[in-house]
Amino acid sequence: MDQLALLFVLLLGAVVSVPVGDRLGLPSPVLMTLLGVVLALLTFVPNVEIPPDLILPLLLPPLLYAAVRRTSWRQFTANKRPIFLLAVALVFVTMFCVAGVAHAIVPGLPIAAALALGALVAPPDPVAATAVAGQLGLPRRLVSILEGEGLFNDVTAIVLYHVAIAAVVSGTFSPWGAGLDLVLSAVVAVAVGLALGWGANKLMDLLGDATLQIGLTLLVPYASYVLAEELHGSGVLAVLTTALFISEYATDADDVMTRLAGHTFWDIVDTLVTGVAFGLIGLELHNAVRTASGRWGEMLGWALAIAGVVVLVRLLWLLPATWLTKRLHARRDYDEDIPMSWRETVVMWWSGMRGVASVALALAIPLRTDDGSPFPDRDEIVFIAFGVIMVTLVLQGLTLPWLVKRLGVQADTEREKEFEKALAVRAAKAAKRRLREIESVEELPDELSERMLRRAFEIGVRISPEMGEEERLEAHEKRVRRLQRVRRIEGELLSAARHEVLAARSEPGADPEVVDRVLRQLDVRSLR
């Protein structure tokens, strides 16, 4: 098996792991990690030969962009306090605790190298957290916090990692310089992200075509990451800024085709890249195994000790942080997503899985320092990092569904239904307001006006059939049944039309591009 065949195996596994995970009740990223471990143990499977410094630039930009599309800037601003406590403060605390323990138990490990170890194992993986949370049906407030933590903690951790590595390589360290680097990295990243987001927004207006616009959204995250890194900024923060800008300002409510196609496209990208990323985590296990070189017992003990520190620090931090956030939340007039019970706090604690970023940072540790000497205890750091990743990702990932079910932490479906009905009412009322505006400038026949009024009401009913109960319109049930019947018959008519158009594709002289264009119009009509 060569490298290309291995890539196809990972891509196939990424697709298959989703339905298998749903059936088994297990997160697909964890299944892909286990698949990678199995492949790494097979003798005929080649070692992965991806340069460590390319893992983050290749995998993180599309994953971050896909994750940001599921959230909004409003969610981040509403949850800035819990996100700060987890994504910034907890990363610092975890780094120093891990560094202290590692420096104490690993003989001869310099404090700067121990800090590098602490920085690379500190951030929970954003992809693992959001993928697992989405499959388990957790309350939206927990998903929002996990998404915010996962998206922003890499920014803090990667900057701290580079500062610690530079201290080991150069032999010098300045706290003020490190703080300045952190601030400048954030400023540069935000500036790059805003500039590229604005430029991408303008370019989308010029492109017009849905295919070209979606293709641009794939290129922009990579451009944002690379440009920010070249300017010594945070590539992760630049991608987040760009994605948030595009999601807020580059959305045309009437651009139906781009929205439908873009949603499908990014779902596919997210599934495939996530699968490959976590498959690579398992495949890279051979690097950690190779570094043990007969010292399994000793190094495994270190890895388990550091994994215990990572897990324990998260729990000890979450308990007072959640209490403090609740106290401050009680004084606010707006809603803020926070854990509302000890059960939800426990689920948040057990969701702190490490993943792609930790692997890439561990493998990217330099082999030598500036004076030509070997990087101190590099093999030990890599082995410990992989031990922490496997313990948190596999152990916590496999047991999290059981824990969620045992504690009974589930999303409030009634609240979601109420919000859906409220949106349906707003949509119907907006349609009616627009109809009245049209009637004020155009003279519509009574029959057409009444028909359009029913259509405006049906817009809301299609979103939430229960909306009619609130509207209390006469003969609601009759209209709903009529609407369902009309939709059924219209669906059959459109199906017959699609079959006829598709059959024309294989006829002599038929232009497949014209056929596909007509078929796409019928497909869009079918979704309305």
Image (tube, rainbow, N blue to C red):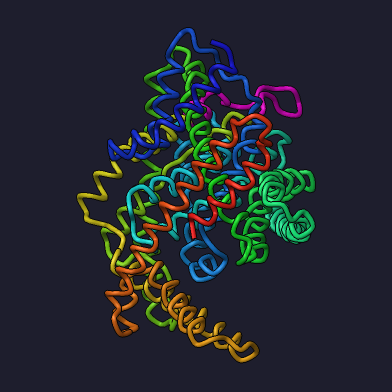
Report if residue 107 is visible in the image.
no
Q: Position of residue 456 (x, y in %)?
A: 47, 77
* Above or below, comparing residue 432 to residue 245 in the picture: below
- For the image, the number of numbered tags is 0
* Above or below, comparing residue 474 to residue 464 in the picture: below
Q: Name the residue at the bottom extreme.
A: 440
Left or right for 509, reference 425:
right
Q: Residue at x 62, y 19 (%)?
A: 49
Q: Name the residue at the front extreme.
A: 508
Left or right for 53, reference 293:
right
Q: Residue at x 59, y 59 (%)?
A: 256
Q: Position of residue 15 (x, y in %)?
A: 45, 32
Q: Indicate whether residue 378 is drawn in magenta.
A: yes
Q: Which residues are magenta?
A: 365-385
Q: Looking at the magenta stretch, what is its main secondary structure?
A: loop
* Above or below, comparing residue 59 to residue 192 in the picture: above
Q: Position of residue 315 (x, y in %)?
A: 35, 52
Q: Residue at x 43, y 58 (%)?
A: 490
Q: Name the residue at the top extreme.
A: 44
Q: Indicate whether residue 92 is drawn in magenta.
A: no
**What is the quadrant of residue 240 in the picture?**
bottom right
Left or right for 157, reference 170:
left
* Above or below, comparing residue 4 to residue 432 in the picture: above
Viewer-nearest residue: 417 or 123: 417
Viewer-nearest residue: 181 or 22: 22
Q: Position of residue 82 (x, y in %)?
A: 46, 64
Report if residue 238 is visible in the image.
yes
**What is the quadrant of residue 246 in the picture?**
bottom right
Viewer-nearest residue: 292 or 27: 27
